Image (cartoon, helix red, strand yellow):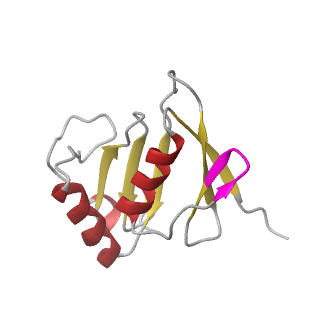
Amino acid sequence: MPVHLNHTIVAARDRDATAEFLVDLLGLEPAPVFGPFRVVQLGNNVSLDVVQAGAEVPPQHYAFLVSETEFDQIWGRIKERGLPFWADPFHREEGRINTNDGGRGLYWDDPNGHNLEIITVPYGGG
């Protein structure tokens, strides 16, 4: 069997608000509770297991490969909510998207400061 990522833990100051933010922005099914986690299920059978972590949350980066249609929908929800977004991971090009690798991409922050990214083409164009 090839190796596949199954899940990763996402630390949050507010577990429920973070799970709802991810589900809402990414257009996913509601995240059920499993033990201390809210399980945000992605389309490739990988889950983001959101856990309550307290006041200090080290920022992480999560990138999501989406279709062109999904990109437009997610970008629309980001703009509807007035969330800042950037074309680059260092947040230097605010209000812009990138066209790296022949696709489109953008970055925005979740309520914990995690750097989220959507791309329509994997890095390297493949």
Image quarter where the N terminus lies is: bottom right
Picture quadrant where residue 94 is located: top left
Q: Tell me: residue 41, above or below residue 8.
A: below
Q: Tell me: residue 108, above or below residue 1.
A: above
Residue interval drawn in magenta: 33-38
Question: Toward the viewer: 107 or 111?
Answer: 111
Q: Does 35 lie within the magenta span?
A: yes
Q: Write the residue at 31% across / 48% down.
A: 107
Main SS of the magenta part reads: strand
Does residue 23 appear to the left or right of 32 in the view shown? left
Does residue 22 appear to the left or right of 85 in the view shown? right
Q: Does 6 lie within the magenta span?
A: no
Q: Tell me: residue 85, above or below residue 112.
A: below
Where residue 21 sits: x, y (%)? 40, 52
Where residue 92 sits: x, y (%)? 21, 34
Residue placed furthest toward the right: 1
Residue placed furthest toward the bottom: 69
Where residue 63 sits: x, y (%)? 46, 53
Q: Write the residue at 39% across / 69% down.
A: 27
Question: Toward the viewer: 126 or 84?
Answer: 84
Q: Write the residue at 28% across / 43% down.
A: 88
| Number of marks | 0
Q: Write the residue at 17% across / 56% down.
A: 79
Where residue 6 sits: x, y (%)? 71, 59
Question: Toward the viewer: 103 or 78?
Answer: 78
Does residue 91 appear to the left or right of 63 in the view shown? left
